[in-house]
Image (cartoon, rainbow, N blue to C red):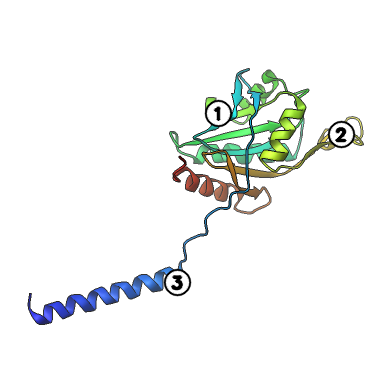
Amino acid sequence: MKHHERIAWVVLAAIMMLVAVVFVRRHPLPPALPEISRVGPFALTNQFGLRVSRDDIEGWVVIADVIFSRCPGQCHQLSQAMAKMQSMVPMGSRIRFVSLSADPAFDTPDILAKYGRRYGAEGERWHFLTGPKREVYTLATEGMKFSVVENESAKPGNLEEQFIHASSFAIMDRRGMLRAMVQLEDPRCVERVVELAMKLSREDWK
C-alpha cells in the first residue's frame, strides 16, 4: 500500500471514530432498567379455570395490571390499553399479559372469561387471574408493587369505589423481576410499555 493511501485510511478511521464519539454523546444509550422486586411464589386460577403459578411465567416478559369486572370506568381504560398492547406485540414474542382481579370473590373464571372476550383477549397470551383474596393481593402489592385495597366505606351500589387500585402497568422480566411501572396517565403509556417489554424480551435471563 502506498504511503499516501495509508495516510488516507488513517484519516478516514479517525473521522469515523470522531463521528461515533459525537453520536454517542448526542444519543447516549438508555440506562438499564432497575431491578425493583422479585415476584414470589403464587398459584392462582385463570379465566379458563387453569392453575397459573410463578413457574408458568418464568421465561416470559409479563405486562400486568389490576382490574375487576364490575368496574365501570378506570378498569375499562386499563383493559382497552392492554388490548392495544396485545395487538402491537408480534405473535411469537416472549411476552405475556396478566390482569389480576381486585374483586376475586366475585370474579370467577367464567366471569373473567366473559370480561376477557370483551377486550379480545387471545388464548394463552392474556391471563385474567383470580383466587383467594389474600393470595391475589399479596402478588399484586408485594411482587408487582401495585396499590390495591377494598374500600369498606364505599356507598352501596357505587362499584367504581368498591376497590381502590393502581391505574398503572407493571413490567417484569423473564426471571420474574419487576423492572418498570408505567402510569396509565402517561400520554405514551401504551407505546412505552410495549417498548420496554420488547427491550426486556431481548435480554439474557439465565
Query: In what element is the residue under mark 1?
Result: helix
Disc 2 versus disc 1: nearer the observer? 1
Q: Nearer the viewer, residue 120 or 143?
A: 143
Q: Is residue 7 above or below residue 50?
A: below
**Residue where numbered disc 1 is placed:** 55
Disc 3 versus disc 1: nearer the observer? 1
- Mark sitting on residue 113: none
Asked whether residue 122 is in view, the answer is no
Q: x%, y% of residue 48?
A: 61, 19
Horizontal relation, residue 173 to residue 206: left or right: right
Disc 2/disc 1 C-alpha distance (Å): 37 Å
Q: Nearer the viewer, residue 65 or 40?
A: 40
Kindly indicate the quadrant of the structure image that contains residue 141.
top right
Kindly indicate the quadrant of the structure image that contains residue 170.
top right
**Residue where numbered disc 3 is placed:** 25
Q: x%, y% of residue 115?
A: 67, 26
